[in-house]
Image (spheres, rainbow, N blue to C red):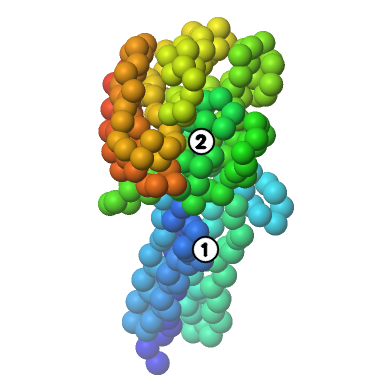
Amino acid sequence: MGGPDGGEGGKGGDITVRGDSNLATLLDYTYRDFWEAERGEHGMGANKSGRGGASIVMPVPPGTVVKDLETGEVIGEILEDGEELLVAKGGRGGKGNSYFATATHQSPREWQPGEEGQQRMLELELKLIADVGLVGQPNAGKSTLLSVISAARPKIADYPFTTLSPNLGVVQLSDHRTFVVADIPGIIEGAHEGKGLGLQFLRHIERTRMLAFLIPIDALDWQAEYDQLRAEITQYSAELAAKPHCVVFTKLDLLGEQYTPELETTGAFGVFSISAPGRIGLDALKDAWWDKILELKKLSAVLRPEIVY
């Protein structure tokens, strides 16, 4: 009697991955692995169209590669803060009967259902650049420190070269602050020439923001050990040697008291003494690392604004 008046259905929401420079890891996706955008509402009488569904944004740190888990296809890579990538498209809304009305077909009874939204299993891979690289001779306490300050569980033993490949750990501070620490295989004299695990070690620490030289408190000569570590890195790469660094004396529990040896350093931003098993000095060390990371991020944004770290 009144003619066709069925409105169109609303479009389903999309799911988008967006770069967020405030994030350093994909840790949040450990706790949530299902994301669903809102469905569109049905069309109604009086030619009222349904409301479109709300879209969902999945925040990730820059440097995240998004893959289709089933096919292995690389959908895209987020390189910059604010960059977006559509990973699942919402379904098209249906057509009400008024859509099919024409001058010669004025009372249509047909209608068109909406389409299902896209469903995907995604794999998120962060091409990780560690914030802090732990540098030291074999058995300097790097793996022990990493296991205490993060959830990483590297192999730990009392013989040289326990660590044969880099281990990464995410350090969590208060207020959702996180940064990444890399436990690099031990360095020995001649590493820059490929001795020991030499070149493998040095290639990995090129991808860190800053270095932490670990020296056990029971070393025979603290200054000589520090100078040797610095020399190996300098001979491998002057650019690598120019990275900010600090010195961390480990195994403080062997002394039974708080003590920081005197050391002549080449521009270190701090000298710390810790005991990883005894949880001594760790908070001060982590806070100093975090402050330096923020400083380096700000400096990078000023000097190289086209690069997102």
- Residue at 47 percent across and 63 percent down: it is 32
Identify the element where label 1 is drawn. loop
Q: Amino acid at mark 2?
A: Gly
Whole-percent x and y of residue 169? 50, 44
Q: Amino acid at mark 1?
A: Asp
The image quadrant that residue 268 belongs to is: top left
- Residue at 60 percent across and 43 percent down: it is 156
Numbered disc total: 2
Q: Nearer the viewer, residue 98 or 295?
A: 295
Front label number (2 vs 1):
2
Tell me the distance, in whole angstroms, between the alpha carbons under discs 2 and 1.
35 Å
The image quadrant that residue 252 belongs to is: top left
Establish if 24 lies above or below 288.
below
273 left or right of 169?
left
Q: Which residue is mark 1?
A: 33
Tag 2 near tag 1, CB within 8 Å: no
Establish if 284 lies above or below 236.
below
Whole-percent x and y of residue 107? 49, 84
User: Which quadrant is the N terminus positioned in?
Assistant: bottom left
158 left or right of 51?
right
Label 1 environment density (alpha carbons within 10 Å; few <14, some 14–19, many ≥20): few
- Residue at 41 percent across and 85 percent down: it is 3
In primary-sequence order, the first of circles 2 and 1 is 1
User: Residue at the right extreme?
Assistant: 71
Q: Which residue is mark 2?
A: 141
Whole-percent x and y of residue 265? 36, 13
Q: Nearer the viewer, residue 62 or 196?
A: 196
